Amino acid sequence: MALINIATHEIHCKIVYYGIGYCGKTTNLQYVFKSINPKARGEMLSIATETERTLFFDFLPLDLGTVHGFRTRFHLYTVPGQVLYERTRLAVLSGADGIVFVVDSQAEKFEENVQSIAELEVNMRRIGKDLGNFPFIMQWNKRDMPSALPVNVLERYLNRRRVPSFEAIACDGKGVFATLRAISKNVMAHL
Amino acid sequence: MEQLTNLVISDRELAFISAALNKLMNDTNATSVMLIDKSGQVIATQGTGVRRNATSLGALLAGAFSSSRHIAELLGEKDFRTIFQQGVKENIFTTMVEEQWLLVIVFDKLTHIGLVKVLSKKAADEMGRILERVRADTTRTKSSVINVQFRSSVEDTIDLLFRD
């Protein structure tokens, strides 16, 4: 739920990165954090286990500065990817204005990706949102891996809604900002 | 119910919110009070204790609250509408306003939790009435802010800032 505060001249939007464990959601946020103008970002919060798997969420506030008199902010979140944290993913989705589904392109992860998208569809219905009419994009991550499936296969089976999609190698930053630009514009268009 | 896609808070309603928060802070002798959206976004704060970390606190408190509601569900409980976090020096009491906002009171050992519970309930009722008005106003007020020029400027800013 975007919040428009006329009194303080602020607009806040929430973007959630969703996907299976180790697909690169946290890596996307870490790349944004280290590459963006430091003035445009706040502190990145990570609630992780000792082995650095995301336990609850990562959080990165971004500040676009003042646009037409309104300070515009995007809050980026990731969900924990591991299967057992389904309830936590649902908790983080609450109030989201846009979703990036990060896909691990490797063939051996295909089934997990399919299940995760199905879970996202169910979770969106549970919070009363229709994914068909919601800012939603796909990121085909890990394009550099030897077992990465061809993009047309991913498109056919994982992008049934035919939403915009972007190839990425998040650890090198490739595709990270293209994804962020697309979802941010999509969220603003839905305001 | 379909969630609203956005919520617009006017000057007038923010003034009511700030006054109610201020009253709650003074009456309970709390160190700080905050109103946050359940998505984690901070709507208003009073008191100096939380201002510097307000953005992070908003995200974490909303996350903790949302998580606790799912715990309730798993226990077969209808809902947990409040959370009490107790520290050595500081305590935090969080309570829901309708299904949309969270009212957060930060207080130390000089304040009794009983007082916080009773007065936060009253304040939450008042916030609920404000929320109702905010919802009614949202569609009308939004078009004055989100116009064509704004959309075009924000797209340019996104291109400028989010680049490799």
Image (cartoon, helix red, strand yellow):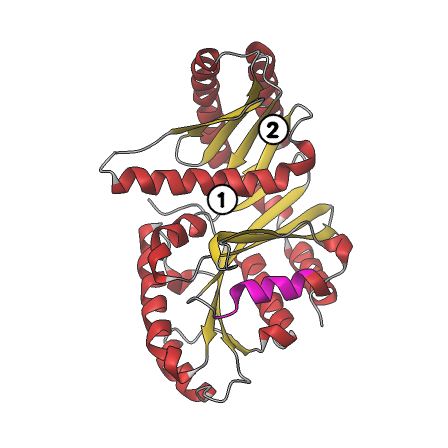
Q: Of helix, strand and loop, which one carries label 1?
A: loop
- Say whether residue B151 is visible: yes
Q: Of helix, strand and loop, which one carries label 2?
A: helix
Whether residue A17 is in magenta: the answer is no
Which of the 4 image quadrants contains residue A107? bottom left
Left or right for A24, reference B15: left
Q: Nearer the viewer, mark 1 or mark 2?
A: 1
How packed mark 2 is, by other alpha carbons closer than 10 Å (few <14, some 14-19, many 20 or more), is some
- Taking A160 as reference, is A34 above or below it? above
Q: Which mark is residue B14?
A: 2
Residue type marked 2: Leu
Which of the 4 image quadrants contains residue B18? top right
Q: Residue at x 57, y 77 (%)?
A: A168
**In x, y percent, where is residue A139?**
51, 73
Residue type marked 1: Ser
Q: Do marks 1 and 2 share a subunit?
A: yes
- Chain letter for mark 2: B
**In x, y percent, where is residue A16?**
50, 57
For marks 1 and 2 on the same chain, the one whose residue lies earlier in the sequence: 2
Residues at discs 1 and 2 in contact (Cβ within 8 Å): no
Q: Which mark is residue A99?
A: none
How many numbered markers are drawn?
A: 2
Stretch of the chain drawn in magenta: A23-33
* Front residue of this view, candidates B99 and B61: B61
**In x, y percent, where is residue A85?**
37, 55
- Say whether residue A67 is visible: no
How packed mark 1 is, by other alpha carbons closer than 10 Å (few <14, some 14-19, many 20 or more), is many
The residue pinned by badge 1 equals B39
* Front residue of this view, candidates B152 and A151: A151
* Front residue of this view, candidates B106 and B2: B106
Left or right for B3, reference B164: left
Q: Main secondary structure of the magenta part?
A: helix
